[in-house]
Image (cartoon, rainbow, N blue to C red):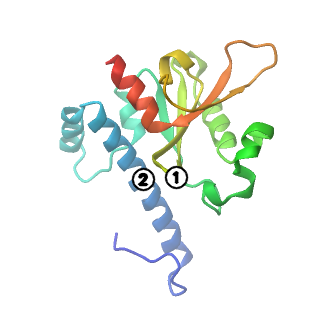
Amino acid sequence: MDKVNPLNPLITKLQKLDYQQDSGKRWEHSRVSWTTNQLALQSYVKRFQKNNPGELLNFEWFNSENYLPIYLACIHDLGKQPLHRNQKAIQPNWFLKFPTLPFVAPYKKLLASLPNSMGRPVGLIFPRKGFGQGLIIHNGSINDYVPHDTGFHVYRTKENSSHEFFIVQSYSSLITKLKSGF
């Protein structure tokens, strides 16, 4: 696809939609590519590219190969504004109104779409200014997925539950923790 300026008033709505979808696919490709480079899985990427010439890497392929003990997905667009400009996503709301943050509803939708018998934690990667690879929200264990020297947010999903949490952390710190376990 030729590069299209989405702000150009002369392009059609269909071209704008194609640009947004293409942008999301490229963002996902770059996250998968970065992840495979960090975990030294380049041989698997070469095999994917040989079997699917011209295709962009995606988490659907990555999850089907079971490279990680966590199921990963990503979302490129969290609404009309980037997360760092969204007034509903400013820092105090992370403590006061966590369920209303823009990335929580897509994450709950992802959880509902997957079978419970999967047996793996589920993570959703989303963009956030200041975090090169974005942030991730997941339901994994703090001990297994969060390095000791990093910041993160924890939200308890149910009252009186000691094991049902949502954790938000930088995606790069999660991969660093997983890399130390490989």
Residue 74: percent from the left, percent from the top? 50, 43
The residue singled out by tag 1 in the image is: 76
The disc placed on residue 113 is none
Query: 167 left or right of 33?
Result: right
Q: CA distance from mark 1 to mark 2?
A: 7 Å
Residue 6: percent from the left, percent from the top? 50, 75
Residue 134: percent from the left, percent from the top? 49, 45
Name the residue: 47% across, 55% down.
Answer: 24
Height in image: 10 above or below 146? Answer: below
Query: 127 left or right of 95?
Result: left
> Considering only order in the chain, which callout, 2 or 1, is on the residue closer to the N terminus?
2
Contact (Cβ within 8 Å) of mark 1 with mark 2: yes
| Foreground residue among 114 and 23 | 23
Residue lying furthest front in this view?
149
The kind of residue on which mark 1 rests is His
Residue 67 appears anywhere in the view: no
Residue 172: percent from the left, percent from the top? 42, 37
Height in image: 146 above or below 128? Answer: above
The kind of residue on which mark 2 rests is Trp
Name the residue: 60% across, 35% down.
Answer: 110
The local crowd at label 2, few if under 14, some if 14 to 19, many if 20 or more residues have their Cα within 10 Å, is many
The residue singled out by tag 2 in the image is: 27
**Residue 41 lies in what quarter of the image?**
top left
Name the residue: 30% across, 35% down.
Answer: 38
The local crowd at label 1, few if under 14, some if 14 to 19, many if 20 or more residues have their Cα within 10 Å, is some
